[in-house]
Every structure is written in C-alpha cells, then in structure tokens.
Amino acid sequence: MMKIIKSTLRTVLPAMALLATMTALAACSENEDIPVAKEVPQLPDWEDNISGEVYDYTVTMAPERPYMHRYDKTMVTKLFMSRPDGQGGSNVGLTFADALDVIKGLDNLSRGLPKIVYLIGWQYEGHDCKYPAFHQFNEALKRPEDATARESYLWLQQEAKKYNTTVSVHILLMDAYTDSPLWHEYVKNDYLCLDASGLFMQRAVYNGMPMYDVNICNEWQKGALQKRLDELAELANLADAKTVHFDAFFGRESPYHGTTVAQMETTMRKVLRYMRNHDIDVTAEFYHNNGERIDPMFGLQAGAWWMDLTSAERAVLPPTLVSGGREGLFGNNVWSEEAFLFGDNYPAEDDFNWVDLHPDRSWKTAWNSVKLGIATHSIPYMYFNCHKVIEYNSTNKTATYSDGLVADFKNLTVTHNGVLLRDHDNTFFPLPWVTDHKEIVAYSKNGYGKRRWTLPADWAGVTQVSISTVTSDGLENTYTLPVENNTVTLTLDANTMLSIQPE
C-alpha cells in the first residue's frame, strides 16, 4: 500500500511552534484578531448519552452489535482517486467512471466475491485536502454527463452493486489544515490540540500544507464532531453504504487542555457507537499500530486496513470479530507467518495509484498484480474464514482448523483432510461464496506442467470439468478436461488463473 507514514511527533521546538501558530492564524485572516483558546466563551455542551467505555469482547468473542457487513467474507479495498496539484487544482488518477472499470475487473478476477471499495481523494482537490472539513466532492472526478461530482459518486454507488461491490469513502477524522473551510471555526472554538505552552502542535506537512491535530474530546463535547459526521453521512450517502473508513484513527494528546490519549480513546469509542447507532460501521487503519493505541477496540471497530496482529492473537480472535485487510503494518510485501496461516485480504490500492506510483497507467501490469493478490491472499482468507481455528503451534508454525484444514508455514502448504490446496504460490481452492454451482480457482505464480490436483470429496461423480481462464474481462478460452480417479491434471503458464467447474 502506498503510504506516507505520518510523523508521531507530539511537540516541536518553541520557535518552530510559534512560527507554525503564526502561519496558522494568518491563514484564517490577515485582518482579524483570532482569540486564543482561554478567551473563548463556553459553548453549551452536547447532551451526551453515548458510552465511551471499553467493550469487553472476551465475554462473547463477538461484536458489541452485529456489524452491518460481513467483513470476514468480504474483500476490502481502496482506490486512490486524486491528490491536490499544489496550484489549486487536482492531479486525477481515477475518475468515478474509471473507478467502475476497476470494480468490474475486480469482480471478474474475484469471481463475484463481495467487495467494499473505499475511495481516497474524493473530496475537494484530493487526498489529505482541507480537513477537518469534508463537505464537498472533487468536481474533477465527475462524469461529463453529470451535473456534479456527487451525482457521479451516487451513480457509482448504484452501478457498483451490479458487481457485488459497496462503495464508500476514506477520511481522516483528526487532521486539520490551515486552508480548511473549518479552520477559523476550529481555532475560535478551541477544537485543536495545543502543546503545554498553548501553541498549535504541527505534526507533519502534506501537500505542502502544515497539518495539525483536532482535539476530538473538545469537539465532541460541543457536538461539533457529531455535526461533522452527520454531514458526511448525508453527503456520501453512508446510509446506503453502511460503512466508512477512518485513516490514522488513534488518540493524540493535547497537553494544554490536559487531554490524554486515554481520554481521546474514550471519545473514539463514542464515535464508533454513534456511527453504529446510525447503522454505519467504521473500519480504521489498524488495531494496535505498534502500541500507539491503548485499546484495539475489538468488537467496536468493524475491521482494520492493516491487521497488525500476531499469530497468537489471530488464533483466538475469530474473523467474525476481527478481520479486514492486509496482515502486518505499512507495506509488508513478503509472506509472513500470520498471513499464510490465517489469511488476509489483498488491498489492490497500489495497483491503480496512477498519481504517486504508476504514472505509466498500465492496466495490464495492474491486473497481473491483482490476479496474484486475489489468488494468494483473498481466496485463501475466505476459505480459512469458513473454518474455526482449533490449534496454533508456534514451534511447528502450523494452524489447524475444523474439518481437517491445516496451514503449514514452514512448508508453505495448505491441506484439507490431506488433500493439497496450496503449495507455495500454486493454489487450488474451492470458492465458498459461490453457491449456485461448484467452482475451484487454480493459480500459479511461476507456472508448472502436468500437475495433478485432487478434487474435493463433494465432487465425487464428476467425470469431466470445464476449464476457463480468469481475466479482468471475465472467463475466456473455455475447454474441457477429463477427471481421473477424482483428480485433474493441469498445465499453467506463469501468473495464470483458471476457473474449474463440473461440466
């Protein structure tokens, strides 16, 4: 995943902080005196009946309330749409029309697997632009036949359903930029984090703009955060999507206010429950983030983009409670024990990032990468999630599931009742989400000749199979092969995916 890792610096040198503060104030207005936090009159508190208590998931090992989506049975992805160009415009990678082309291809390669796609850079001029506001779509992304970008977004939401896909948005809840329409209001109402001396805490620079932190405790207390969330839900039609993604969702202290990370996390839990009260799940970037979170919020947060969990955690936390995206944290592109033994989702975000990573915009390269990812990540993950972990052996590095399913990291194999489903990056998995017919997807990263695979027991009696090449455009080059002693012999070129169905 393309990731600009955000600084975790909490304070800066006094001179730098003063300069940042002066810059921030000047960005509001050159001619208006902006009061400091201690001079702001108290606004009435919002009538708060939302619990911020920690949820004890260990009692039931289930979510506090059922999630609106089955994240354990869903491929979770993002699409990078645009980034500000630094000149008041937008560097567009994908329009809403382009996004539908990607969604169609993902659906073909995943063989109709349910999917959620979160759009990055859908607002204003693109990614990391004008937070904490998210009141406007990026008009550069709209279709020519639509009057507004929001109209194009709503069109995409509905069209994507035809391809087993839910479309929603990616936001950052706690970031603030000086060019935001809300900057002046948030300064006046004391909604920004301040260091011990009362100066703004600049944490990083993105798109050439200084970035500060929102004190969500202060914002929540006055009802401003709830207002922001309500406006986002209306604008992005979250009542339809029933899910939204919060990037970098972790607590940030504000020493001047005496606000601790633990207090921030209390408000974060309120936010998760508030959204669920409106039938909207919140997924976030991670669960732990190298200990930056005190509470991973299992059972409240519906999923994580990075499943930064150990094998020991994965063995006891059911996927109906904890699931989501890629195992690890921030770009782990080699096989990890956790990913191989327990599965993870292929994110697909980097493959279509024409702005930062792939200016050549090669669709062929992107689809080849997606094919590898779906075959070796998402499909095994969905298969594992249909079984319950019985035992994790940290010495042998194996995970044993119900019904005789065994993943072996040392040998890089997966077997089911002794029948081989995976050998390194050669796979042969039945598709559990396909219910109207039997189907297996076979894949090889490097290719092989005349390899024999045993069919599942419930294929007994099948004497001939139909073989088709799986592509982003659908099934192609269909032919038949005989079944001999409940086995089929395949020859695959490198990076080839085949659909196998009873003839």
Image: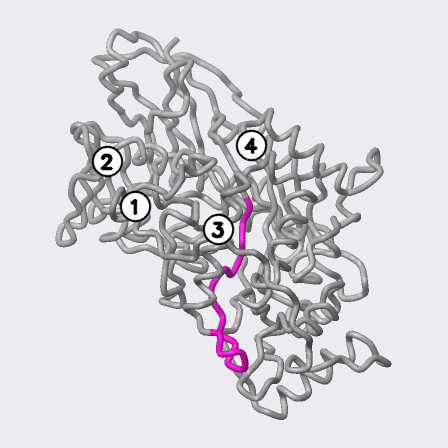
Q: Which residues are magenta?
A: 244-259
Describe the element under mark 2 as helix, strand or loop: loop
Viewer-nearest residue: 295 or 19: 295
Is residue 239 placed above or below 300 in the rendered structure?
above
Image coords of residue 206 (percent x, y) = 64, 69
Query: Of the residues under marks 1 and 4, which one precedes in the sequence?
Result: 4
Look at mark 3 in the image and give the residue it sits on.
272
Direction from residue 450 to residue 179 in the image, left or right = right
Is residue 503 placed above or below 456 in the rendered structure?
above
Query: Of the residues under marks 4 and 2, which one precedes in the sequence?
Result: 4
Q: Which three-letter amino acid code belongs to the residue tagged 4?
A: Thr
Look at mark 4 in the image and give the residue it sits on.
165
Quadrant housing the C terminus: top left
Image coords of residue 487 (percent x, y) = 25, 18
Look at mark 2 in the image and give the residue it sits on.
388
Q: Residues within 10 Å of mark 2 (few under 14, many from 20)?
A: some
Q: Which three-letter amino acid code belongs to the residue tagged 2?
A: Lys
Single out the mark in the foreground, 4 or 3.
Answer: 3
Q: Which three-letter amino acid code belongs to the residue tagged 3?
A: Leu
Look at mark 1 in the image and give the residue it sits on.
340
Viewer-nearest residue: 442 or 491: 442
Q: Residue furthest bottom?
A: 15
Q: CA distance from mark 3 to mark 1?
A: 30 Å
Q: Quadrant of residue 289?
A: bottom left
**Residue 258 on the magenta segment:** yes
Q: CA distance from mark 3 to mark 2?
A: 27 Å
Direction from residue 47 to residue 372 in the image, left or right = left
